[in-house]
Image (cartoon, rainbow, N blue to C red):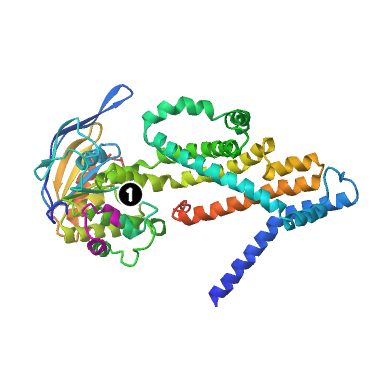
Amino acid sequence: MASENMSKELHIKDVRKKFEIDNETVEAISNINLDVRSGEFISIVGASGCGKSTLLKMIVGLQKPTSGQIVLGNKEIKGPSIECGMIFQESRLLPWLTIEDNIKFGIHEKLSKNEKKKIINQHIDLVGLKGFEKALPSQLSGGMQQRVSIARALINRPGILLLDEPFGALDALTRINMQNEVLRIWKAEKTTMILVTHDIDESIYLGDRVVVMSSRPGKIKKTINIDLPRPRDRSSDEFIRIRKEIYSEFFKDEQIPVEYNI
Amino acid sequence: MEKQRNNKKIKLKNILETAYSLIIPVLIIVTWELLSKNKVINQSIMPAPSIILNTLKAMIIDGELGKHLGASALRVVQGFAIGASLGIIFGILMGLSNKVNKALSIIVGLLRPIPIIAWVPMLILWMGIDEGSKITVIAIGSFWPILLNTIHGIKSVDEKYLEVAQILEKSKIETLFKVIFPAALPSIFTGIRLGIGTAWMSVVGAEMIAAATGIGYLIMYARELSQPDVMLVEVFSIGIVGLVVDFLVVKLQNRLLKWNVVEKNR
């Protein structure tokens, strides 16, 4: 078990990331500071290329910040570990394994066969895929594959789950369904969640807070608290107001002159 | 009821497909037979299918064909086992390590373009005309396609899977056996399929030069006795064995790799 069902808090301190491309130094992320409370759901919204995926990769440990620190709980992140679970835009399920074997692949701890079977079934139930244990990933729809991916990412009870544009490849209706699924799983597991998305609505619907990132270099422009009760009404006045606020960070409203012919 | 009707439809479809694929072969055989009967084709160099069929029956009955095909097959099995093992081992080493790859790249680049037949005189010099030299020819023939396809398979394992393995704290060994090998298996199988084909083609070449048994030997012997019908029986048997072996390999491949569905309608 990674953390015995305890979700962790995350501190991102003065993180910068530079890349060397064609002998030029490109600053992808510049001076990010963010504190995520234990059990919180944070949405990071930004345009493509603003560095939000790079930020997630640094949190999960696949990349190192050029300077600054990322601390999970009380330990600095030095590399990938089972303390952080992550799901991506593609489900990244191993195509030669069945659903239950894919989830089994995630298990890190040395458990007996029966114990493993028990937690695999628990997680299959958690993501609502009972009955599909022996299916191959190619036999499932995109949404179902993502659910397996979530089950695999949560199997070690990580302190934090990172979601990198997880629903970008799904159709709009499935996307809404999956957003509700994620909320349900979050309520059940209480894991700290960080979601990265370019869908403004999604970021408001899911997050306790929405972090707006600007691009080139990536910086936190604004953090908005979402004080709406769940389940959220996407057409409520407050929701619309927040949507307008975030929208205006990306698009300047142009006044279109209206012509009158009298 | 619906299922029975569908099964009947599928069976009919299969029969029609098989019939369709037989049209051209049957047409060729019929035309060939007619032209032979009318002496348009010189019978002393290209006998009619009916004559070839009779010779085939005779050769099967007296066991000649079987005995020599068996001898060739044995050589192929032995040579292929050696060539495939070395091909996979070196393929894995070169695929996993850039250093090993760089170190061996010149030797590989130099030896690969050499046609296997060119090795035969050297091998006879080094190893004599015994089984050893023939098996080595076949091993060399099987080695190259398997080596190259294994390297390709290992190098093209999707990095996305490797990232998942890293996040799940999988050890390097675990990643190798549980992610890299299964992912590389389709390419390795392609190499094996090509390798078996090359192995079978190499055995005939090797036997034509120095052997006392085997299908290649039979062909040379029949040529010396001016028996074009025997030669043609042997030549076609080579093709038929090759076809059957390839068919079996593909069946095995489909069973082991049934997860390898190329996504068409996503």
Nearer to the camera, B212 or A236: B212
Query: Quick check: can you spot residue A262?
Result: no
Residue A38 to residue A18: above or below: below
Nearer to the camera, B56 or A104: B56
Quarter holding the N terminus of chain A? bottom left
Instruction: Point out residue A7 in the picture as x, y percentages from the top left corner.
Output: 13, 52
- At a point 67% along the width and 62% down the height, the residue shown is B16
Instruction: Point out residue B138 in the picture as x, y percentages from the top left corner.
Output: 57, 39
Q: Residues within 10 Å of mark 1 (few under 14, many from 20)?
A: some
Nearer to the camera, A14 or B19: B19
> Dot 1: what SS?
loop
Query: Quick check: can you spot residue A115?
Result: yes
Instruction: Point out residue B172 in the picture as x, y percentages from the top left corner.
Output: 29, 42
Residue reaching furthest to the top = A23
Quarter holding the C terminus of chain A? top left
State yes or no: residue B8 in magenta: no
- At a point 54% along the width and 55% down the height, the residue shown is B251
State yes or no: residue A109 in magenta: yes
Residue reaching furthest to the left = A74
Dominant secondary-structure state across the stretch colored magenta: helix
Instruction: Point out residue A204 in the picture as x, y percentages from the top left corner.
Output: 21, 51
- Which three-letter amino acid code belongs to the residue tagged 1? Gly
Give the total number of marks visible in the rendering: 1
What residue is disc 1 on? A168
- At a point 45% along the width and 41% down the height, the residue shown is B88
Instruction: Report the magenta residues as a range.
Output: A103-120
Nearer to the camera, B31 or A44: B31
